[in-house]
Amino acid sequence: MRPKRNGRRPAILLLLPVLAMGLESCATAKAGPRPDGLEPGGTVIFRDRIEEMRVRTALEVVERGTTHLLIQRQREGSPVRITHRGRDSIALQGDVRVVIDGALVSDGPEALENIPAKSVEFIQILSGREAVLRFGSTGGNGVIIVKTTAH
């Protein structure tokens, strides 16, 4: 004997379109950088704002343009460190990674000091959560993306 139907559809059938849209948005979020080089999310500082800051280097742009990053200069000749400011800094005990024109650089703060602010199209700062989607575990402390006009 067949069970009697009362005209209602099972709840799972109603959720299928919603799940499909959710999966589609996940796929686009992980698809990679947009054609202009920007990643989804983060704080972006564009060229016009950089010119207003009147800074000399890309490192100064990061220092003046963000409030959640801490630029640490110990003493003359020692390397500069970029870390998180505040309570997350206890859990995130590593430097923020730096990507310049699509290439991950190992000496990020030094590389930022060597880039003239005039040659920067934009600088994007991704938090750890945003960066892990694109860069995996290496982006766990956050990523600074720099796009220069030379590229």
Image (cartoon, helix red, strand yellow):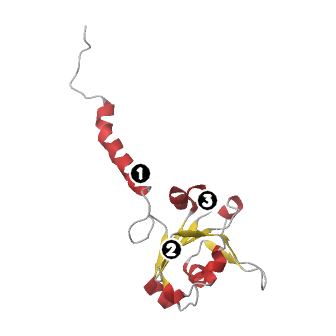
Q: Amino acid at mark 3?
A: Thr
Say which of 144 and 89 sits in front.
Answer: 144
- Amino acid carrying mark 2 in the image: Asp
Q: Which numbered mark, 3 or 1, is in the foreground of this view?
A: 3
Give the left or right position of residue 62, taking residue 4 as reference: right
Residue on which disc 3 sits: 138
Kind of element beneath mark 2: loop
Question: Where does label 1 land, which residue?
Answer: 26
Q: Mark 2 near mark 3, Cβ–Cβ under 8 Å?
A: no
Q: Earlier in the sequence, mark 2 or mark 3?
A: 2
Confirm or deny contact between disc 3 and disc 1 (CB under 8 A).
Answer: no
* Residue 108, image quadrant: bottom right
Distance CA(mark 1)–CA(mark 2): 25 Å
Q: Earlier in the sequence, mark 3 or mark 1?
A: 1
Q: Is residue 55 left or right of residue 14?
A: right
Most distant residue in the bottom direction: 54
How far apart marks 2 and 3 lie (CA) works out to 17 Å
| Residue at left offset 43%, top offset 86% | 48
Earlier sequence position, callout 1 versus callout 2: 1
Q: Give SS at disc 3.
A: helix
Residue 135 in picture, x, y percent from top left? 54, 59
- In the picture, residue 58 is in which quadrant? bottom right
- Looking at the picture, how far across and down is residue 88, in whole percent? 65, 62
Name the residue carrying label 2: 101
For the image, the number of numbered tags is 3
Q: Nearer the viewer, residue 92 or 34?
A: 34
Depth check: 87 or 42 in front? 42
For the view shown, which residue lies furthest in the left direction? Answer: 7
CA gap, disc 3 and disc 1? 20 Å
Q: Residue at x 25, y 29 (%)?
A: 9
Check disc 2: other Cα within 10 Å, few if <14, some if 14-19, many if 20+: some
